[in-house]
Image: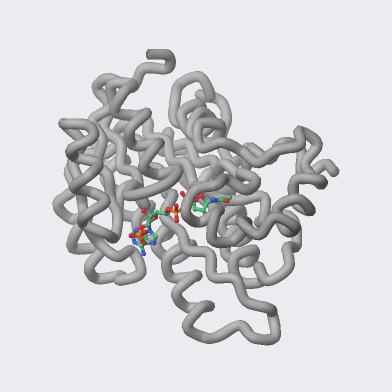
Amino acid sequence: PDPSFSGRRALVTGAGKGIGRAAALALSGAGAQVVALSRTQADLESLERERTGIETLCVDLGDWDATEAALSKVGAVDLLVNNAAVAVLQPFLEVTKEAFDRSFDVNLRAVFHVSQIISRQMIARGVQGAIVNVSSQASQRALREHAVYCSTKSALDMLTKVMALELGPHKIRVNSVNPTVVMTDMGQINWSEPQKAAAMISRIPLGKFAEVDDVVNSILFLLSDKSAMTTGVSLLVDGGFLVS
Ligand code: NDP
């Protein structure tokens, strides 16, 4: 496959479903040794059945101590995909502390924590690492009922830049992919209502939502040596939404 990741070990978070699962399968298909991390054991078991050789880690990334314990045993990682996230939609005036804390713990704090652990270990091993954070078009455009989600993704884009700045001298590249709506479980919960979906699609120049593979292809590009001189960017996979 092109690009090839043979000889490289990849950690993908939120790999039980959706984009993360597809990214884990694609990386494995392209020769990487994959560690799939997610929250629901049954999803990880079905992933192991779907592709032999994928290693799995079951942990809730909202739990700081459990994450630290799980990752202390993960071994060498060269490529990291911070994909796990939650989208809890609430009108701004009704946002709860629970939704705020859970969203920031999973979507942002866990990215800090996992990336710190993995980067320290990349630096100690002297490898050229690559990290891709899965952000969203929602980081750069206000969307109704997305106050918390938009805020987490906006912060994630800035974290991506500061990590690129500080980790660049250690030969670790850090970028994000920023998709439009994808009809995964998350996408279906939030965008199944036909009028809401049609209104969003009408604002996308390419006239459709993204496919899981569109996002996975961009993740693989940013993990690969094909993007060797690119760090600190947010690669839009939005069909042109943000220029419309
Ligand atoms: P899904 O909800 O389909 O899948 C998310 C995966 O992450 C699940 O396996 C889920 O496990 C896991 N996960 C969630 N929370 C945790 C946690 N605390 N600890 C460990 N694993 C966790 O989402 P998508 O595949 O659609 O989303 C993937 C990424 O893409 C996210 O960062 C999302 O914000 C982003 N994105 C999605 C878009 C969309 O329209 N779908 C658009 C733009 C960006 P479990 O189900 O067991 O909780």
Q: How many marks?
A: 0
Pick the front one: 233 or 243: 243
Query: In the displayed structure, would residue 183 be above or below residue 51?
Result: below
For the point 31% across and 48% down, which residue is it?
A: 118
Q: Identify the image's colour scheme: rainbow, by chain, secondary structure or one colour.
A: one colour
- Relative depth, front residue between 43 and 156: 43
Q: Is residue 233 left or right of residue 171?
A: right
Horizontal relation, residue 155 to residue 10: left or right: right
Q: Is residue 166 above or below residue 149?
A: above
x then y, percent, for residue 89: 60, 71
Q: Quadrant of residue 24?
A: top left
**Which residue is rendered at x = 34% and y = 47% of the image?**
15
Q: Residue furthest right?
A: 244
Identified at 26% across, 35% down, the residue is 34
The picture places residue 206, in percent across and down from the top left corner, at 76, 33
- State the residue lying farthest toward the top: 1
Q: Quadrant of the N terminus?
A: top left
Q: Who's the residue at 40% across and 36% down the image?
A: 23
Quadrant where the C terminus sits is: top right
Residue 148 position, x and y percent, is: 60, 71
Residue 55: x %, y % from top left: 18, 41
Ligand 1 is in which quadrant of the figure? bottom left
